[in-house]
Amino acid sequence: MPKHPLFAIMGQKTSSENKAERMTQTEKKDIYNLLKAASSCVLGYIPQEYCGGEPDFQDDVISSEKQKSGGMTLESIERKIKACKNCPLSNTRTNAVPGEGVENPFVLVVGEGPGEDEDLSGRPFVGKAGQLLDKMLAAISLDRKCNCYIANIVKCRPPKNRTPMPQEADSCSGFLQAQIHILKPKAILAMGRTAVQNLMKTEQGINSLRGKILDFNGIPLLATYHPSALLRDQSLKRPAWDDLKVFRTKLEEICPEYAKSFDEARKEN
């Protein structure tokens, strides 16, 4: 039976982000019968496209992952971040830096904000601090290419790499919360004071928060020194390593074989 143009419209969900409604099988049948009756009345006969039996209509469905995330995707959040004008940081950025990593990460790594290298590339942690971060993660069998996602408290570079102001962090908090909701990490590694204070909504300093497992809405979270701090002060490397060992123990508790994907990725490379 030839396919009526309107059948295609009824048979799939619109791709527009502004239309979250889905049509049921019954709604599609009602529209079909209405169109059939209207066409027959106007023409005086039943059009060929309505002959041969009623189409097999089905309820519109979306993937289980999109259902869990309320229809949001990392791509849709990324587009919103790149178009964001919620705070003055958007006026001085070269590129917004949404984040980078796998879509189903075991660990979410959260830093402070983009630096100069990140602002130019649009990628998180790619400068000297990023290179050190990659080494720190590798030491506990984590990697942005196989089991991590890396994001920041703010998505645009603060001028001269200064600490983000509270209103700037607040303007970006919705994006990070949406990413956490979509990614559903099993654990979070907060790099530095700004990251852990904003995530945990506290004014406690990094020295009192680091090295112990905290609870972020049911997700285990550990804070340690930011890689930039380690580059400035070599004496912080030992306590940072102690923090990472605590985090690794927690990861092994959550999933004893979590390092398998990391080891397999290293063998392939």
Image: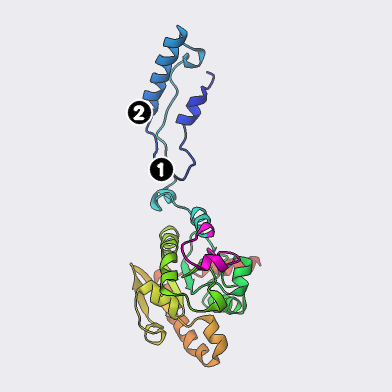
Residue depicted at x 33% and y 67%? 217
Q: Is residue 119 magenta?
A: no
Q: Quadrant of residue 183?
A: bottom left
Q: Name the amino acid, label 2.
A: Thr
- Badge 2: residue crowd in 10 Å (few <14, some 14–19, many ≥20): few
Disc on the earlier residue, 1 or 2: 1
> Which residue carries the number 1 mark?
20
Q: Is residue 249 in view?
A: no
Vertical order, 10 against 19 (above or below): above
Spatial CA distance of label 1 from label 2 is 18 Å
Q: Quadrant of residue 222?
A: bottom left
The boundaries of the magenta stretch are 82-100
Q: Position of residue 39 (x, y in %)?
A: 45, 14
Q: Name the amino acid, label 1.
A: Ala
Vertical order, 56 against 155 (above or below): above
Q: Which mark is residue 26?
A: 2
Q: Is residue 89 magenta?
A: yes
Q: Secondary structure at mark 1?
A: loop
Q: Position of residue 214 (x, y in %)?
A: 35, 76
Vertical order, 92 against 29 (above or below): below
Q: Which mark is residue 237?
A: none
